[in-house]
Amino acid sequence: MTEARLTEHERTPAAGRIGVHERVSWPTTLSFGAPGLGAGYMYLMLALYVMKFSTDVLLIAPAIMGVIFSISRIWDAVSDPVVGYLSDRTRNRYGRRRTWILASTFPIAGMFIMVFAPPDSLSGTGLIIWMTVAIIGFYSALTMFFVPHLSLGAELSENYHERSRLFGVRHAFYTFGSILSLISFYILISAEQEGTAVVREKAFELAIIASVVMVVLIFVAIGQLKERADFQGRVKSSPFGAFRDVWRNHHARLLIVVTFIEHIGSAAIGVLTLYVAQYIVGAPLWAPFIILCYMVPSTFSVPLWIPLSRRFGKVRLWMFSMGLTGVSFGSMFALPFLDGVELRIAYICVAAAFAGLAAGCGGTLSPSIQGDVIDYDEMVTGERKEGSYFAAWNFVYKSAIGVMLLLTGFVLQFSGFVPNQEQTMTVQVAMITLYGLLPLVCYTIGALLFSRFKLDEKAYLEIRRTLDERAQASSAQA
């Protein structure tokens, strides 16, 4: 009886509808994932290199950069919810998500170029203001892309495991973009040996190329992807009501807490790898390879995690990946006490590979689970608020990175860090504590909390059954 009911529901004429048992086509899947290539490149460039670019090339104090990133996170408390709510409420013949994705295209490109192209004539307060506007502007523009894009992914399929494939492909594109950015890191790190003027020139050229590619990928995605017309106009709540619903959703509330804790830990590799490679490992030119050891398993393990999630369950598998990530990072605390650069290089590369393997699982399954939570909200409220939900998770994700950047700035400043000099053991221990022990603690707490999450496949099928019955009843009344 249930199977017949689902089959009839799949025949409901709605633009872009993918039913419970249907497979999303590869053109749609690839078009959805492709912009992640540019987003992954750009985001990692800011997360990994802009702090070092600012302190070692522009000569801005680390604490000031920490404050700039913290201000951007405070602004996110406004921009993320606003974009999420307005995206949910948008009514347009091009779709409520694609309209926002298109609007983000040129602001993303312009602000990314601005970050890496401060005028040579600027210094002191003027340079700080420039970087503040550029960084906050870029993150705001990226919010206009990220929140609607993730929301669209949750709408493309109602299948519990098909969502994992969609977001897994997106994660693969995203991390592959991050891998490509490692070429840029190597170019820029090498250019540091030739002087700051060369670094500035190379950074500007790379920013131009990345921005053009991102614009092209977004236009390709917008042309291929379709949206569900029946989801438009299904948000009646006020902004405060929408986010009150998010917080009242006990599944979402637990995910918000776990996501924040988890990403404080994962931000370590983005913020500190270049510092660790130069000042602890003693091999700054190896930094891109260390990151590559993290990114390659994260990208290419996606086909492994999807079938494993079908066998063991998305929830249990994600919890396992948190534990593996924590142990992998925690093992790096031994780095300052190892003798020899070669040994330290080999050690950190192996640890990074295991951390990246686990990250592939989290990047594939976490947004898929978030999509399941949104369907639970639809069952409770009758509304489709993907934008509000992904805005909340996006804000938490970026807030965690902001906390890590702020913490890093002040720890470096007050532990006695001196740019481009050999660091004392006090500074090295401070760095590796942030890089190793803090992620271990965060991921352990996150895994323990996530063990309380109850929305598994069985619970989701019950939610889906309820929603399908409502859809049938509504169609019969019409």
Image: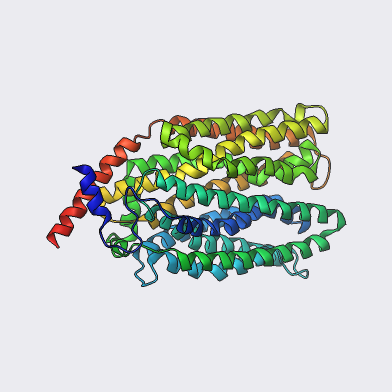
**Quarter placement of the N terminus:** top left
Q: Position of residue 42 (x, y in %)?
A: 62, 58
Q: Up-down: is 444 above or below 109?
A: above
Residue 180 is at least partly visible in this image: yes
* Quadrant of the snapshot with the C terminus: bottom left
Compare residues 287 and 467 and report the one nearer the observer.
467
Residue drawn at x 52%, y 68% as measured from the top left: 219
At horizontal 37% and vertical 52% (from top left) the residue drawn is 157
453 vs 421, nearest the viewer: 453
Q: Is residue 52 left or right of residue 452?
A: right
In which quarter of the view is residue 228 placed?
bottom left
The reply, left or right, for residue 266 in relation to residue 416 is left
Q: Is residue 107 left or right of residue 131?
A: left
Q: Colour scheme of this structure image?
A: rainbow
* Front one among 137 and 24: 24
Left or right side of 279 for 440: left
Relative image position of residue 174 (x, y in whole percent): 57, 52
Q: Identify the residue shown where x is 59% and y is 49%.
A: 175
- The single residue placed furthest to the right in the displayed view is 194
Q: Nearer the viewer, residue 45 or 165?
A: 165
Tally of numbered tags: 0
**Residue at x 26%, y 57% (from the top left corner):** 11
- Residue 455 in sight in this render: no
Residue placed furthest toward the left? 477
Give residue 307's position: percent from left, percent from top: 46, 37
